[in-house]
Image: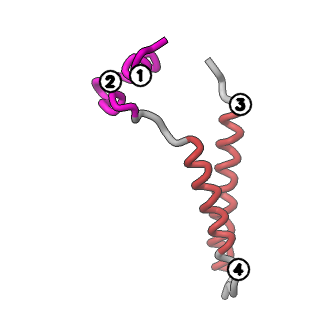
Amino acid sequence: MASNSREIAVRSGVDPDEEPSVDWGWHATFPNGTKIAGALSAIALILMLIGHPTSWTEILFMVIPAVALLAGVAWSIRRGRHAWRR
């Protein structure tokens, strides 16, 4: 078992000399954070429809991005569940 983050990074293919953030443990993405942010943004866009939309353009510019965000979140979840594992 690796004793520190540097050994783990070397084993995962990250060069610690190229990316010094490995030393203090910050070398990852936010897989759940991006999905949550996408879903919350889509919900916010849909909630903006409450009230009095004045035209179809207003509705389309809120619904189409919301649907695209939700589709992206769903695709990301599906891709994560069916990813090749080594």
Asked if residue 36 is among those painted magenta in the image, a careful observer would answer no
Classify residue 75 as left or right of residue 27: right
Q: Earlier in the sequence, mark 1 or mark 2?
A: 1
Q: What stretch is highlighted in magenta?
A: 1-25
Identity of the amino acid at label 2? Pro
Gap between marks 2 and 4 measured at Cα? 50 Å
Horizontal and vertical percent position of residue 57:
65, 79
Contact (Cβ within 8 Å) of mark 2 with mark 4 = no
Q: Which residue is the extreme one toward the front?
A: 3
Q: Tell me the distance, in whole angstroms, between the alpha carbons under discs 3 and 1.
A: 24 Å
What amino acid does circle 3 point to?
A: His
Q: Nearer the viewer, mark 2 or mark 3?
A: 2
- Report if the CB atoms under discs 1 and 2 are less than 8 Å apart: yes
**Quick one: 4 or 16, which is closer to the camera?**
4
> Image check: 76 left or right of 27?
right
Q: Which amino acid does label 4 sit on?
A: Ile
Q: Which mark is residue 50?
A: 4
Q: How many marks?
A: 4
Q: Residue at x 62, y 72 (%)?
A: 61
Q: What element carries label 3?
A: loop
Whether residue 10 appears in this view of the structure is no
Please say whether residue 76 is visible from this viewpoint.
Answer: yes
- Please state the horizontal and vertical placement of residue 23, each as a whole percent of the image: 33, 28
Q: What element carries label 4?
A: loop
Point out the tag, 3 or 4, that comes first from the N-terminus: 4
